[in-house]
Image (cartoon, rainbow, N blue to C red):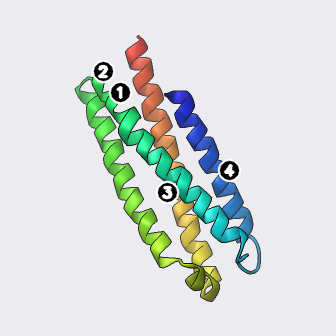
Amino acid sequence: MLRTLSDYHRRIELGLDDIKRLCRDDAPDPIMLPRARATLGQVSIERGRFINQVVVPRLLASANYASARDILALQNSFAANRLVSDQHVSRWTDETIAADWQGYRAAAAAIWRMMEQQRDDEQALVIRHLEHVCL
């Protein structure tokens, strides 16, 4: 489970790196940026399914009350972040990005921080829980 989650996180980091690199350009790349966004979005969706269908049920199966509370809080945080991300994708179409490149780059940077924090929270919770179960 941890290995699979780490693989998703690695793929997300690579996707973020691609978009960050593209955002350093003076203008949006009309071919590469949409591809990078689509790839990152797909990996994020897959990770979300894995979290909700595999990680959360497995962790809850052996969780004490405090752990269960933390697991459910992470799941709620993930759902809230998914909404923010979906709104970002809806707001920033190819056309709106081209019309306001600076605005997109600022909005994207906020999403990157959110995704990186979510990754850190997921890793910490899973590792903490696995250590608890293995003790």
Element type at marker 1?
helix
Q: Residue at x 72, y 73 (%)?
A: 31
Q: Is residue 25 left or right of residue 87?
A: right
Q: Is residue 39 left or right of residue 80?
A: right
Indicate whether 135 appears above or below 128: above
Q: Residue furthest left?
A: 65
Q: Which residue matches tag 4?
A: 14
Q: Earlier in the sequence, mark 3 or mark 2?
A: 2
Q: Amino acid at mark 1?
A: Arg
Q: CA distance from mark 3 to mark 2?
A: 28 Å
Q: Amino acid at mark 2?
A: Ser
The crowding category of the residue bearing disc 3, from other C-alpha atoms within 10 Å (few below 14, some 14 to 19, many at least 20), is some
Q: Amino acid at mark 4?
A: Leu
Q: Which residue matches tag 2?
A: 62
> Can residue 118 be seen?
no
Mark 3 vs mark 4: in front: 4
Q: Are marks 1 and 2 in contact (CB under 8 Å)?
A: yes
Q: CA distance from mark 1 to mark 3?
A: 25 Å
The crowding category of the residue bearing disc 1, from other C-alpha atoms within 10 Å (few below 14, some 14 to 19, many at least 20), is few
Element type at marker 2?
loop
Residue 135 appears at what percent x and percent y?
Answer: 41, 10
Q: Earlier in the sequence, mark 4 or mark 2?
A: 4
Q: Residue at x 76, y 74 (%)?
A: 25
Q: Which residue matches tag 1?
A: 58
The crowding category of the residue bearing disc 4, from other C-alpha atoms within 10 Å (few below 14, some 14 to 19, many at least 20), is some
Q: Is residue 79 left or right of residue 117?
A: left
Q: Earlier in the sequence, mark 1 or mark 3?
A: 1
